[in-house]
Image (spheres, helix red, strand yellow):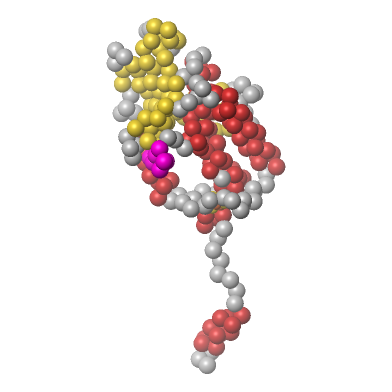
Amino acid sequence: MSDTSVNIRNIQHFMYCPRRYSLLELNDDWSENYFVIKANLLHEHVHDGTHDFSSSEKLVRSNMTVYNDSPEYDLFGVVDCVEFVRDNFGIKIEGADGTFRVRIIEYKPKAPKGGGFNETDAIQVFAQKICADSIWGCDSEAYLYYSDIRKRVKLPFDTEYQKYDELLKNILCEIRKIREEKAIVPRAKSQKCLGCSMSDVCFPKVKKYNVKDTVMSQKGECGE
Ligand code: SF4
């Protein structure tokens, strides 16, 4: 890893809101709310090691660190779950007999209302795929698992690889620019902030100074 390596979880922060990412990265600001805690609990459960198993069909490993240190990406992160599915046309995995197809799965607490998947979730998994493919020399399949509907959604990286690759590279470029310039990104007018755990840090609600209120309160203190 180098100073310019990007942690995959920052890609999601950036996609949610560039200002949020800059507050986290440059100010070390952090604040949690219900949604953040719920997502953290889900990941703690997935990463506790109890989900690992081996069968005649597949090897399942949770909480796997992945990276791609090519100058093109220079990324690292953690995949919730990797399934090595036995396949005669697959690749060899160190320490295991046979050949396998690689499948990566990221857990999320809530599916989008209209069905399908969130684009911010998909780009995070695409970054994981870029890392997994570089480590194991494969073309991994990728899924999101939405725990509220208990469903896996396959991500269309086989048909839309170019689109996600360009998106990822643009995001990495923007993230590195924020780091270099060391400037907090202004709040965009179009930004939707509902549910953001950082709102108190981002725009603290300071009561406006009002001369009349101040005079009245001072009168009260003097017993007038
Ligand atoms: S409150 Fe809004 S502008 Fe501020 S970090 Fe959150 S999403 Fe971004």
Residue 84: in magenta span: no
Q: Position of residue 34 (x, y in %)?
A: 40, 50
* Quadrant in which the N terminus is drawn: top right
Residue 114: in magenta span: yes
From this viewpoint, is residue 157 visible? yes
Q: Position of residue 14 (x, y in %)?
A: 57, 41
Q: Residue shown at 45%/27% (left/top)?
A: 155
From this viewpoint, is residue 39 visible? no
- Determine whether 215 is above or below 150 in the image: below
**How many marks do you count on the picture?**
0
* Image quadrant assignment for residue 90: top left
* Image quadrant assignment for residue 75: top right
Pick out the residue farthest to the front.
114
Foreground: 29 or 107?
107
Q: Position of residue 71 (x, y in %)?
A: 64, 23
Q: Residue shown at 38%/44% (left/top)?
A: 38
- Determine whether 163 is above or below 95 in the image: below
Pick out the residue farthest to the right.
181
Foreground: 166 or 127?
166
Q: Residue shown at 52%/32% (left/top)?
A: 123
- Determine whether 161 is above or below 17 in the image: above
Q: Main secondary structure of the magenta part?
A: loop
Foreground: 146 or 92?
146
Q: Tell me which segment is drawn in magenta.
A: 109-115
Pick out the residue farthest to the left.
55
Q: Position of residue 166 (x, y in %)?
A: 61, 28
Q: Residue shown at 35%/21% (left/top)?
A: 60
